Amino acid sequence: MPRKPTAHGRLEVAIVAYLRREQARDARLYSGEFSYPTDKIIRFVYGLSWPSEPSAAQAVAVRRALRSLVAKGLAKQTYRGAKKHSAEWIPAGPPTKKERREAGRQKREERKRSQERLNEIFDQMFQRKGNDAERATLAKILGMLGSDHQGEREQAAVQAERLRKKLGITWQELLGIT
């Protein structure tokens, strides 16, 4: 049975629905891009009429939900002025070509840094003990840990432990932690 969304999740769902609904309405009536102020979003989410003011807790909860939506890429923040509380929000559209390119470049750089770090760890580890044959063996064993079969994964763990004992080093040394 699926879990019900938390109060925070329900706020996020309501905010996204509001932003998309308002954007669709404004697109039919006007040209250009419109943004929606935080106080208007708070009033919609809690069903408040204009003379009544939202409580501080309501305002904080909606602002937290908006920040979470920005982190998830579902909303974007714009500013109409220099004040922090004059933020306005728009639903996030699909990423632009430039944003996709940048994200791909960052992923490639992160993969390259991870591979370089792994190579450093292997170099440090095998400078003290081991050789290329043991390095190749360890690489094969670590590859087996990603198997879909439970028995193969268990056997890979046993083999990795045997190799560690054979090299006479601890797991911390093997991973380059100490």
Image (spheres, grey):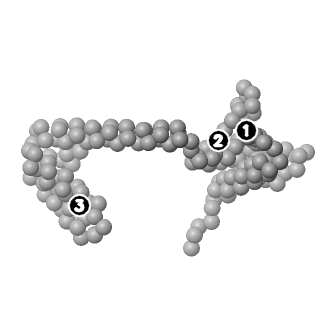
Q: Residue at x 18, y 47 (%)?
A: 170
Secondary-structure class at tag 1: strand
- Where does residue 92 sit, x and y in percent of width and height? 63, 46
What residue does disc 3 label? 144
Q: Residue at x 74, y 44 (%)?
A: 59
Q: Earlier in the sequence, mark 2 or mark 1?
A: 2
Residue 76 bears which disc, if any?
A: 2
* Mark-to-mark CA distance, 1 and 3: 50 Å
Q: Residue at x 21, y 48 (%)?
A: 171
Secondary-structure class at tag 2: strand
Q: Nearer the viewer, residue 92 or 172?
A: 92
Q: Quadrant of residue 109?
A: top left
CB under 8 Å between discs 3 and 2: no
Is residue 73 at least partly visible in the picture?
yes
Residue 88 bears which disc, if any?
A: 1
Residue 52 bears which disc, if any?
A: none
- Where does residue 76 sit, x and y in percent of width and height? 64, 41
- Where does residue 133 sit, x and y in percent of width and height? 9, 49
Vertical placement of residue 172 versus 152, above or below: above
Q: Quadrant of residue 96?
A: top right
Q: Dot 2 surroundings within 10 Å: few (below 14), some, or many (20 or more)?
A: some
Secondary-structure class at tag 3: helix
Is residue 64 at least partly visible in the picture?
no
Residue at the extreme right: 51
